[in-house]
Image: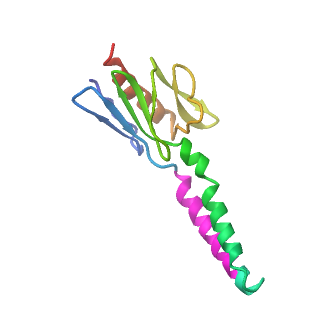
Amino acid sequence: MNRREGPSKTKVTVLGGQDGRTTVRLPLPSWIAAWYAIALVITVAAYFCSVYVWHDMPGIAIVFALVFAVIPLPAFAMTVRRIDADTSGLTLHYLLRGPKRIAVNDVGATDANGDYELTFDGEAPRWTALTLRSRAEAEWVAYELRQGLAQRR
């Protein structure tokens, strides 16, 4: 199988096995650490306000912590961490839910409002967050997945 070199600043890893399977490992979205850092700061501020301003109401801080922890869960459920391409199609492995098997013939890359995402048979998969950092990275991942799918033809 022909392998192309990926873009220089990519965090995506492409692995090819002897069995013809291609595995693409995707990084966590970059906003997760910032989200939880901001949520922690707001929760600490809510705690101090609840103790010193509203006097002995630390439940407010607990509510803030729970709300800020739960808000990104739908995005996590749609985030793909790994894609396996083999003779029977693609398997998308999500961050919070089980794998999803899809039969596709073609993998492409498209611009989605400044982000780049993969398309399967010309369409972006529904309820799936699969964005990449640059056009070069998206086209490279699409190429590698097409190579994995080509093993079945």
Please indicate whether residue 96 sits to the left or right of residue 111 in the image.
left
Which residues lie in the magenta part?
30-48
Taking the spot 49% from the left edge, 24% from the top edge, the residue there is: 108
Nearest to the observer: residue 92 or residue 42 = 92
Number of marks in picture = 0
Nearest to the observer: residue 64 or residue 145 = 64
Q: Where is 97 relative to 87, above or below?
A: below
Taking the spot 67% from the left edge, 78% from the top edge, the residue there is: 47
To which quarter of the image does residue 34 belong? bottom right
Q: Residue furthest left?
A: 18
Nearest to the observer: residue 126 or residue 151 = 126
To which quarter of the image does residue 86 belong? top left
Q: Where is 151 relative to 141, above or below?
A: above
Nearest to the observer: residue 66 or residue 14 = 66
Q: Where is 59 relative to 110, above or below?
A: below
Q: Where is 76 relative to 53, above or below?
A: above
Please indicate whether residue 65 sits to the left or right of residue 13 in the image.
right
Taking the spot 31% from the left edge, 19% from the top edge, the residue there is: 151
Q: Which residue lies furthest to the top in this view?
A: 153
Q: How is the image coloured?
A: rainbow
Tell me, yes or no, whether the highlighted magenta stretch contains residue 42: yes
Q: Position of residue 125 (x, y in %)?
A: 56, 29
Q: Where is residue 28 in the image (x, y as percent from the top left)?
A: 47, 49
Instruction: Name the quadrant of the N terminus.
Output: top left
Q: Where is residue 63 in the image (x, y as percent from the top left)?
A: 68, 68
Taking the spot 45% from the left edge, 21% from the top edge, the residue there is: 103
Instruction: Name the quadrant of the C terminus.
Output: top left
Majority secondary structure of magenta residues: helix
Tell me, yes or no, whether the highlighted magenta stretch contains residue 43: yes
Q: Position of residue 105 (x, y in %)?
A: 44, 17
